[in-house]
Each structure stands twice: as structure tokens, then as C-alpha cells.
Amino acid sequence: MYSVNVRDHFMIAHSFRGETFGPAQRLHGATYVVDATFRRQELDEDAVVVDIGLATDVLKEILGALNYRNLDEEAEFRGRNTTTEFLARVIFDRLKQAVDDGRLGEGARGLDGIAVTLNESHVAWARYEQNLQ
């Protein structure tokens, strides 16, 4: 299996509901380093997994829509705990939509999977991944 990873980051504010979250129930900030990993069994006709330039641009665009936002105030997240795990899935869904829309190039339609990892720190991260085929 081949893979290509692109990386970027974004900063948000949010709070959580529920005793599980202790002090994180209060408004707080997070800076995430995001790794988007694209996988395929065989390289495409250009001998690549995905166009790294397009993948970088699309990830930057997706994260730009979240950057410097208080997620508690965003209608699409109202009433949700925007945990690291939850946000990994949101970013995955947006990357998958970009693949489906052809925004990562026609070759990306042959991807076997995508994984999105949100690194909260050097010791904690969460990932969402899914096979596409």
C-alpha cells in the first residue's frame, strides 16, 4: 500500500458539555496539526498516490473554513461536542467530498482510503480513517 501525507494546522475555540470533560466545559482554545494521509494499493498512471499540490491546497482550504472560529458559535456544530475525534471525521468528510468533486484530480478517484489525524500535542492525537473502495 502506498501513501502520501500532507500537513497543515488550524486554531479554534470551543467548549464541551458533560461532566466527562471537567474543566474543558469552559471555553478554551486548541491548535491542531493536521495530517491527511491518502492511500492506494497501486500508483496511478502518473506514478503518484495523489497530486500533493492539490491535496495541500484542498486541506488548507478546508482548515481555513475552521481556523480562528469559535465552534460553539458555528451553526453546523451547534449542540455538538466538537472533540478531536469528531473534528477528524468532519475534515475527512470534506476531503472525501473534494475527491468526489474532482478537486484533487481525476487520479484521486482511485484512492483506496484516507486517514485524518489531528495532533493536539506531541503526546495526544485522534484519527479518523475510512476505506473508499
Image: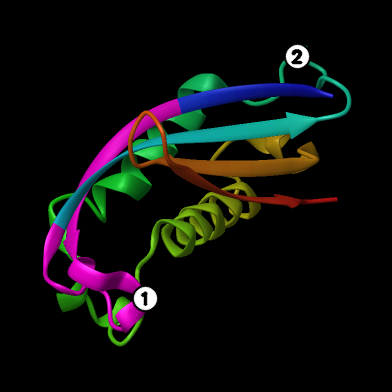
Q: Quadrant of residue 38?
A: top right
Q: Amino acid at mark 1?
A: Thr
Viewer-side residue, 30 vs 129? 30
Residue at point 48%, 54% (across, down)? 88
In the displayed structure image, the side of residue 45 where residue 86 appears, left or right: left
Q: Nearer the viewer, residue 45 or 13?
A: 13
Residue 65: quadrant of the picture: bottom left
**Nearest to N terminus: mark 2 or mark 1:** 1
Q: Tell me the residue at 48%/33% (across/down).
A: 35
Query: Residue 27 in magenta?
Result: yes
Q: Is residue 97 magenta?
A: no
Instruction: Report the Cα–Cα distance between label 2 and label 1.
Output: 48 Å
Q: Give the amino acid type for the residue marked by disc 2 in the picture.
A: Asp
Q: Which residue is mark 2?
A: 46
Q: Which residues are magenta?
A: 7-28
SS at circle 1? helix
Provide residue 98's location: percent of width, then percent of height. Answer: 54, 50
CA neighbours of label 1 inside 10 A, class few (<14), some (14 to 19), many (20+): few
Give the foreground label among 2 and 1. 1
Residue 40 position within the rendered picture, expressed as x and y whole percent measured from the top left: 80, 31
Vertically, is 12 above or below 120?
A: below
The answer to whether residue 87 of the structure is visible from this angle is yes
Whether residue 6 sits left or right of residue 68 in the image: it is: right
